[in-house]
Amino acid sequence: AMPHFGEENCIRGIDGSGTIFFSMCNLKCVFCQNYDISQEGEGVEATPEQLSLMMVDLQKQGCHNINFVTPEHVVPQILEALPMAVQLGLRVPLIYNTGAYDSMESIRLMNGVVDIYMPDFKYWNISLSKKYLIAKNYPDAARQVIKEMYRQVGDLVFDETGLAKRGILVRHLVMPDAVEDAQHIMRYLAREVSSHTYVNVMSQYRPAGKVSTKKYPEINRKITHDEVKTTLSVAREEGLYRFDARDFMR
């Protein structure tokens, strides 16, 4: 749990996003850059009471929001902790930061609780999802939950200082040899979710996690300028709002 300054400008603001990372993500992405947390279980066990105190402490440090990272498998525990945190004075917006491999049950439980949904949309292709996320049903799950997230909170809206208050912000990490997937994802977001969707096209992919093993040579490289440019181009063609963590709005 810490103030995090690596998120989008409208999330981190000046004083950071109050980020709480949960161990053991329900996805097993072979390229995960937080592999020690997401798959090796680095972290400490916390009671709901302790979790509520973490939230309040982050607010006291000046954080603009509470940012739950990979929370799908601990939704009941978060919901148990939140009333205690509110009684202790928690007032900042709540962010649900996920890989979008969520159950509809979890997302529906968060209806009226979450202010900002921040899902990734990683892959469109079933074969690529099976190989790199170890979840062949990922594309269908992501499509369903992102639509439900949008139904709950709508398009992203901001306060007078430019901080996000409510809505959905979708992230897409540009991957090696996956431009076609990116094109499908951008078109889906624009045509099936909302043409006003804010999308962070992220260009910081680097080989991490299990990528250096001989099983994944095709993604054991940096992405190219053309891969990023093509993804941004299709987002622009679809009329999506685009920005990334280094350059708010472009």
Image (cartoon, rainbow, N blue to C red):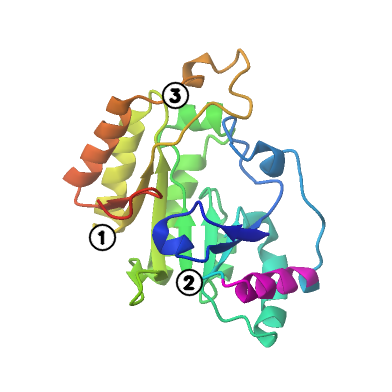
Q: Residue at x 63, y 57 (%)?
A: 71
Which of pointers 1 and 2 lies earlier in the amino acid sequence?
A: 2
Q: Residue at x 54, y 77 (%)?
A: 92
Amino acid type assigned to the residue bearing label 3 in the image: Lys
Q: CA distance from mark 1 to mark 3?
A: 30 Å
The front one of 159 and 102 is 159
The front one of 71 and 233 is 233
Q: Residue at x 79, y 70 (%)?
A: 50
Name the residue beneath numbered marker 2.
115
Determine crowd level at label 3: few under 14, some 14-19, many 20+ residues with C-alpha closer than 10 A. few
Q: Nearer the viewer, mark 3 or mark 2?
A: 3
166 lies left or right of 193? right
Q: CA distance from mark 1 to mark 2?
A: 17 Å
The answer, for residue 147, to whether it is visible in the render is no
**Residue 200, horizontal then vertical, whole percent:** 37, 49
Q: Is residue 218 magenta?
A: no
- Above or below, 56 against 225 in this view is below
Which of pointers 1 and 3 lies earlier in the amino acid sequence?
A: 1
Amino acid type assigned to the residue bearing label 2 in the image: Asp
Q: Are marks 1 and 2 in contact (CB under 8 Å)?
A: no
* Kind of element beneath mark 3: loop
* Kind of element beneath mark 2: loop
Residue extent of the magenta highlight: 50-62
